[in-house]
Image (cartoon, rainbow, N blue to C red):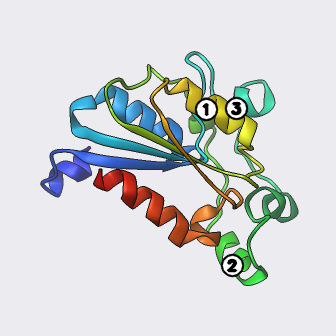
Amino acid sequence: IEEAESAGLQRIALVGHSLGGITITETAYRYPERIARLVYVGALVPPLGSSASILMIGADMEGTVEITEETARALFGNDLTEQQWVEHARSLVPDAVGIMNARLSGYPAGIPVTYVNMSRDVPVPPALAEQMAANLGPNVKRRTIDAGHTVMISQPQALAEIINEFVAS
């Protein structure tokens, strides 16, 4: 919100991927008058009182979340070429436990919402994506891309078209 203000923007659209779903949900809940639209991309939106870590492993996490490159590739690079994976893997860092254990204060109301899921997503498979979209209410517009979790690398044009379609509406 501070960045939007410094740029002179009164209302903004937020796009959240994966754990970014928690961030955009909380931001929209706290500042609904500033948010024009929400677009979730393979995003986690836990039930109230729950967290991403509870969704993923059944309990709150401690420490940092570190995984092997082999596991990371299976989760986040299952549809990337070798070149795409090598480039993308350089940007991966351990997730902060705070965001994994964060609880939402509530869900935003009155803000148009789109949920994009990926048919080959491993961390947020279609059945989990269905639950995440349902947490956002009955009026969520849905789209599916035939891709894995890191759709912004493997299918950037398809994702951009969907985001642009909804942000422009």
In the shown orientation, is residue 44 left or right of residue 69? left
Residue located at (48% from left, 48% from top): 16
Q: Nearer the viewer, mark 2 or mark 1?
A: 1
Pick the quarter of the image with the N terminus: top left
Give the SS element for disc 3: helix
Q: Are marks 2 and 1 in contact (CB under 8 Å)?
A: no
Figure check: 19 above or below 83: above
- Seen as rendered, the residue at the extreme top is 49
* Residue situated furthest right in the rendering: 70
Q: Residue at x 69, y 60 (%)?
A: 146
User: 14 left or right of 46?
Assistant: left
Assign a secondary structure to mark 1: helix
Task: Check disc 2 and report its element: helix, strand or loop.
Answer: helix
- Circle on res. 64: none
Establish if 111 lies above or below 37: above
Mark 2: which amino acid?
Answer: Gln
* 66 lies above or below 112: below
Residues under labels 3 and 2: Cα distance? 28 Å
Which circle's residue, 1 or 3, is located before the other in the chain? 3
Q: Residue at x 27, y 31 (%)?
A: 31
Q: What residue is disc 1 on?
A: 132
Q: Which residue is mark 3?
A: 53
Label 3 neighbour load within 10 Å: few <14, some 14-19, many 20+: some
Q: Which residue is mark 2?
A: 84
